[in-house]
Amino acid sequence: MQVEPGQILALKARYEAVRDTIQAFVDLEGYNLLGSPLAEDDVSEDAASVFRENADTAIEVARHFIRELNLNIEQLDQAARTYGLAEDTNKTNIQQTGGL
């Protein structure tokens, strides 16, 4: 991935927002995807089993995507440190809050 140095922090923030949104969905709604049979017949139980397997797969894919986002966020953070962008951001934040 190639990112202009001036865009590193903005991209990192976008990745963090996407990660947080997906993580919140998995945390809040993952349990609801597990699905129970709607009736006590064989067809309903089979359908619930298949749905549960698909839900488990979807949740695992989402968790894998979150892990990949975390790796990319860490790489962007390292790139920001390499370019001295993190220090610039911290200095700006301190100045805006009246710390300097």
Image (cartoon, rainbow, N blue to C red):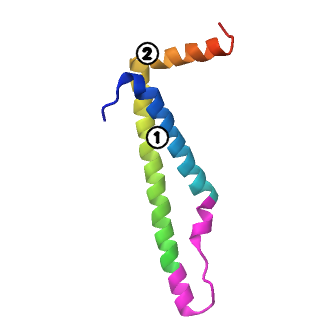
Q: Is residue 36 rendered magenta in the image?
A: yes
Q: Is residue 5 left or right of residue 52?
A: left
Residue 16: image location, x then y, percent: 51, 39
Label 2 is placed on what type of residue?
A: Gly
- Residue at image position (50%, 14%) is 88
Label 1 is placed on what type of residue?
A: Asn
> Along the line of sight, which residue is nearer the eye, 64 or 17?
17
In the rendered view, would you say 35 is above or below 13? below
Q: Is residue 29 left or right of residue 76?
A: right
* Badge 1 density bin: few <14, some 14–19, many ≥20, Cα 10 Å: some
In the rendered view, would you say 52 is above or below 100? below
- Residue at image position (63%, 90%) is 40
In the rendered view, would you say 38 is above or below 59? below
Q: Quadrant of residue 84?
A: top left
- Residue at image position (55%, 86%) is 45
> Along the line of sight, which residue is nearer the eye, 77 or 10?
10
Residue 49: image location, x then y, percent: 51, 79
Q: Is residue 80 rendered magenta in the image?
A: no
Which quadrant of the rendered structure holds the N terminus?
Answer: top left
* Secondary-structure class at tag 1: helix
Residue 63: image location, x then y, percent: 48, 53
* Badge 2 density bin: few <14, some 14–19, many ≥20, Cα 10 Å: few
First in sequence: mark 1 vs mark 2? 1
Q: Main secondary structure of the magenta part?
A: helix
Q: Quadrant of residue 75?
A: top left
| Residue that badge 2 annotates | 84
Residue range highlighted in magenta: 29-48
| Residue that badge 1 annotates | 70
- Residue at image position (61%, 55%) is 27
